[in-house]
Amino acid sequence: MKYNIRKKTLLKTIFIEEVEKYLIRAIVVGVILIVLVQTFFLQDPMQLYMSFSEKLNQEVTDFDRQYPEARATSGQVAAFSTVTIRLENFSSLQKAKLLINDSVVADFRDKQVTVRVNPHDVLSIDGSYYTHRLVFKIVSASKNVAQPKTGRMVEVYKNQVSLDPVDVSESH
């Protein structure tokens, strides 16, 4: 009988030690999982989808509007033909748009806009949002840009006005 009691006690001890060993392992794995899950929760999922500049501003960047000089250019004539247009009778008009080939590339919130142009691009100014006359002036153009001419005044009244197609000459 003593032998059976000792055997039962030994079996209980072995059973308890085995359960304890697996219980400790389960607790350690559980703590590791909790730490990992909490680490994932600390990460903002939107950061995966936002570029560096968008993270700084927390807004989507309209690349063509903010960086018109980065427009793709054709390698036919000059790679760096630019035209600068200035709003003459107001200091800022956010809803007045500059279009190149019917695509909005800039607005006149900063009064003056410089854009890179390619041969045969059609520049348009859309002032249809406003109910008063808007006056724009082509204040500068690259030396190789023959059309539109520097100094030309453009008046827009509740509509969209297109300028002559851009003419780039190779001689300059």
Image: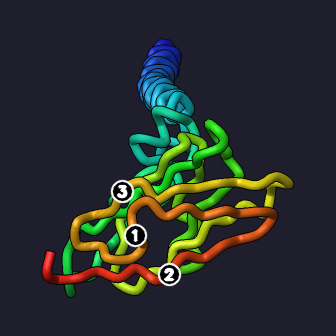
Residue furthest right as drawn: 131
User: Which amino acid type corresponds to the residue marked 2 in the rendered image?
Assistant: Asp
Q: Is residue 15 visible?
A: no
Q: Which mark is residue 140?
A: 3
Q: Is residue 44 visible?
A: yes
Disc 1 residue type (three-letter): Lys
What's the residue at 22%, 66% (across, down)?
143
Percent x, y of residue 148 = 42, 73
Q: Nearer the viewer, residue 14 or 69?
A: 69
Point out residue 140 in the picture as x, y percentages from the top left corner.
36, 56
Q: State the image quarter where residue 102 is shown.
A: bottom right
Q: Amino acid at mark 3?
A: Ser
Q: Closest to the observer: 37 or 20?
A: 37
User: Mark 2 near mark 3, Cβ–Cβ under 8 Å?
Assistant: no
Residue at image point 60% right, 76% down: 162
**Res 149 label:** 1
- Separation of marks 2 and 1 at Cα, in angstroms: 10 Å
Label placed on residue 164 = 2
The kind of secondary structure element at disc 3 is strand
Colouring chosen for the image of the structure: rainbow
Along the horizontal axis of the image, is 155 left or right of 15? right
